[in-house]
Image: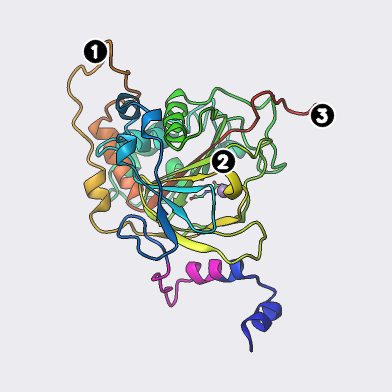
């Protein structure tokens, strides 16, 4: 049977087929076509790109844990104008702070998470503290019930995405975290976007058997603004397709610290995460060294230095985070929902 006939017969387009190919467990798929930006990129599909080193001072980059923009390894993909892949622009030792924020801080109120859908606010008030005990002693008494942290699937920030209506709304908003706003702004400035406003965030928490289906992010009202995606913990295969659902996608690995920007003509492309894969040996251990917190680090910045949003992560917190990301992946997407002068339509 020809390939096309097979597609017609199964009713599956090329994207769905590749999604299933990479999701398959037995036998495991061949990953040799998956682009890996962390190594040598010589596939002929990838172009190194020049960002805007002068748009972000080294101090501003460092204040959110990023290397100087001139040191970012950024790539474009042929045929995907507006798509930018930045291979781990984080300074060594700064990812622990962001991972701690994703696991301990952002799931807290007033942000919204999946557990709120079927639990009372007082039961979801302290996901972290309630999970710490069982996570930091994995070999302790057999756990019958998963901890709240292990049951966390998503958190929304800013304009809270409504998963049922697929809408954002003016009256479902809480302040967007200032630290993540600052990180997002340094990334977009470095990529040459001058006025990106982070207004909504979605955090996805993946276990080793999780996947994310084929979709387009089109709920935002202004599609001319870039969409940012940050990855922490275990790696993933990411599929980037076309404007049509059936367009065959390109596969790439996303590792901890990698940042993706979907902008311009690539803002509304189909994409998916068919598979979580173990991070390459040594990558997490080399990147995720939590620098010991010096006593009284507060207010160490000299007046001319941009004050850092990074706070030291305690040994206790880091032990829990490390245990978690041993088998999990965290993805943060940051979106501008409204254009500069735009409002939500009156309903
Ligand atoms: C999303 C998304 C991709 C990822 O949240 O919309 O596409 O890498 N996430 O998890
Ligand atoms: Mn998406």
Q: Which one is closest to the eye, mark 3 or mark 2?
A: 3
Q: Do callouts 2 and 1 mark residues in contact (Cβ within 8 Å)?
A: no
Identify residue for label 3.
Answer: 347
Q: Earlier in the sequence, mark 3 or mark 2?
A: 2
Residue 149 forms part of the magenta stretch: no
Q: Which one is closest to the eye, mark 1 or mark 3?
A: 1
Residue 269 versus residue 344 in the image, above or below = below
The x and y percentages for residue 117 are 61, 38
Magenta span of residues: 18-33
Residue 84 versus residue 109 in the image, above or below = below
Q: Distance of mark 3 from mark 2, alpha carbons?
A: 26 Å
| Residue density around tag 2, few if under 14, some if 14–19, many if 20 or more, within 10 Å | some
Label 2, secondary structure: give it: helix
- Residue 345 lies in quadrant: top right
Residue 30 forms part of the magenta stretch: yes
Q: Nearer the viewer, residue 312 or 145?
A: 312
Q: Distance of mark 1 from mark 3, alpha carbons?
A: 50 Å
Q: Distance of mark 2 from mark 1, alpha carbons?
A: 41 Å
On residue 302, the disc is 1
The x and y percentages for residue 176 are 52, 26
Main secondary structure type of the part rendered in magenta: loop
Quadrant (top left, top right, bottom left, bottom right) of the C terminus: top right
Label 3, secondary structure: give it: loop
Residue at x 31% of width, y 46% of height: 323
Q: Earlier in the sequence, mark 1 or mark 3?
A: 1
Identify residue for label 2.
Answer: 114
Residue at x 59% of width, y 66% of height: 15
Residue 124 versus residue 212 in the image, above or below = above
């Amino acid at each position: 049977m020809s390939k096309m006939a097979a597609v017609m017969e199964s009713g599956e387009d090329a994207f769905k087929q590749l999604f299933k190919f990479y999701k398959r467990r037995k036998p495991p798929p061949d990953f040799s076509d998956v682009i890996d930006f962390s190594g040598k990129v010589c596939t002929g599909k990838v172009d190194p790109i020049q960002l805007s080193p002068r748009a972000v001072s080294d101090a501003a980059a460092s204040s959110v844990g990023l290397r100087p923009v001139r040191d970012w390894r950024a790539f474009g993909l042929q045929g995907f104008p507006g798509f930018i892949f930045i291979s781990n622009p984080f300074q060594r030792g700064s990812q622990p702070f962001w991972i701690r924020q994703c696991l301990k801080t952002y799931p807290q109120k007033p942000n919204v998470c999946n557990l709120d859908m079927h639990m009372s606010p007082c039961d979801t008030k302290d996901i972290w503290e309630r999970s710490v005990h069982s996570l930091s002693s994995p070999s302790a008494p057999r756990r019958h019930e998963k901890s709240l942290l292990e049951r966390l699937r998503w958190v929304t920030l800013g304009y809270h995405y409504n998963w049922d209506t697929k809408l954002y709304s003016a009256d479902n908003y809480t302040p967007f975290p200032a630290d993540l706003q600052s990180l997002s702004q340094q990334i977009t400035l470095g990529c040459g976007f001058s006025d990106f406003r982070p207004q909504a965030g979605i955090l996805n928490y993946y276990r080793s058997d999780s996947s994310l289906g084929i979709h387009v992010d089109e709920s935002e009202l202004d599609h001319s603004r870039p969409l940012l995606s940050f990855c922490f913990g275990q790696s993933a295969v990411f599929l980037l397709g076309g404007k049509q659902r059936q367009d065959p996608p390109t596969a790439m690995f996303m590792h901890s610290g990698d940042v993706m920007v979907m902008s311009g003509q690539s803002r509304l492309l189909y994409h998916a995460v068919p598979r979580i894969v173990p991070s390459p040996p040594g990558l997490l251990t080399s990147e995720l060294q939590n620098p010991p917190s010096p006593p009284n680090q507060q207010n160490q910045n000299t007046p001319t230095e941009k004050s850092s949003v990074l706070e030291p992560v305690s040994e206790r917190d880091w032990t829990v985070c490390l245990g978690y990301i041993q088998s999990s992946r965290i993805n943060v997407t940051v979106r501008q929902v409204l254009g500069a002068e735009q409002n939500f339509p009156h309903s």
